[in-house]
């Protein structure tokens, strides 16, 4: 990093132009701070991004895989995990302060951080209060690459535990394709009927892919 002209160093560039002016590799280099013998930190950052499908894939990478990367010790891996958790918490705090439909993009961004890059299917529920503010996010069921067993009774129980007035349902498709299946539609209606018995509304169901999130409400499927 010191070999670069001052105007090209990520830290100086950030202080001069703001973080939005930095490329992903430059932001990552700031976190890594140092490279390895024969590999500068910017080159190392770019290799990490290329090898993990970008910043999202890197932040979501399994710890065992990251541990095999030369120069990426426990301290650096912990910092990467901390960045992801800070982003999640910031969005969670935003959704807890105002109705979720006042910030629909924040909902999508939050679900991307939680679900988009998982290699297995997860069914999650966002429990909302009477003002449709986030009370809790819970990944409730984990499945294989192709299916998840979801038990309406468990969703009902957690809704009552949280005193929820409404819920948002969400699950990912590890294939990366966000198109809802017939099984997804059937599950949504089953949960909608079950939760209506305790006066809890299903406001939407999101299917999360790698590059897209499909909303059941927008599709007219609710």
Image (spheres, rainbow, N blue to C red):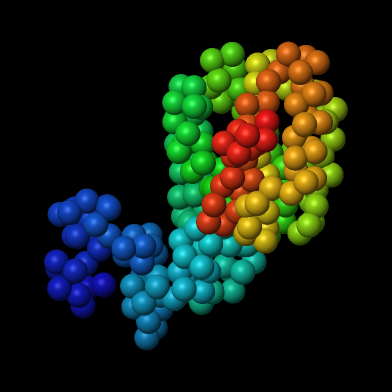
Q: Is residue 118 visible?
A: no
Left or right of residue 115: residue 139:
right
Q: Is residue 25 above or below residue 193?
A: below
Q: Is residue 166 above or below residue 191?
A: above
Q: Is residue 49 visible?
A: yes
Q: Position of residue 110 (x, y in %)?
A: 52, 41
Viewer-nearest residue: 186 or 75: 186
Q: Position of residue 77 (x, y in %)?
A: 51, 60
Q: Position of residue 147 (x, y in %)?
A: 80, 52
Point 75% across, 26% down: residue:
192
Viewer-nearest residue: 146 or 2: 146
Determine which quarter of the picture holds residue 9: bottom left
> Hey, which residue is sitting farthest bottom in the picture?
38
Q: Quadrant of the C terminus?
A: top right
Viewer-nearest residue: 220 or 26: 220
Q: Quadrant of the N terminus?
A: bottom left
Counting every numbered tag in the picture gives 0
Point 60% across, 17% down: residue:
129
Viewer-nearest residue: 189 or 197: 189
Left or right of residue 162: residue 101:
left
Q: Is residue 78 above or below residue 86?
A: below
């Amino acid at each position: 990093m010191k070999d670069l002209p001052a105007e090209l160093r990520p830290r100086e560039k950030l202080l001069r132009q703001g973080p939005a002016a930095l490329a992903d590799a430059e932001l990552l280099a700031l976190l890594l701070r140092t490279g390895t013998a024969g590999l500068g930190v910017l080159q190392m950052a770019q290799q990490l991004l290329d090898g993990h499908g970008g910043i999202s894939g890197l932040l979501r990478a399994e710890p065992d895989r990251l541990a095999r990367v030369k120069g990426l010790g426990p301290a650096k891996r912990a910092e990467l995990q901390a960045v992801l958790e800070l982003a999640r918490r910031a969005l969670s705090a935003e959704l807890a302060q105002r109705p979720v439909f006042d910030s629909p993009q924040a909902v999508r961004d939050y679900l991307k951080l939680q679900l988009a890059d998982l290699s297995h299917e997860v069914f999650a529920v966002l429990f909302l209060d009477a003002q449709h503010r986030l009370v809790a996010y819970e990944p409730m069921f984990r499945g294989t690459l192709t299916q998840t067993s979801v038990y309406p009774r468990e969703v009902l129980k957690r809704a009552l535990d949280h005193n929820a007035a409404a819920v948002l349902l969400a699950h990912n498709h590890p294939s990366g394709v966000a198109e809802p299946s017939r099984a997804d539609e059937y599950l949504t209606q089953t949960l909608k009927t079950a939760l209506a018995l305790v006066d809890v509304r299903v406001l939407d169901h999101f299917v999360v892919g790698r590059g897209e999130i499909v909303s059941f409400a927008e599709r007219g499927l609710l």
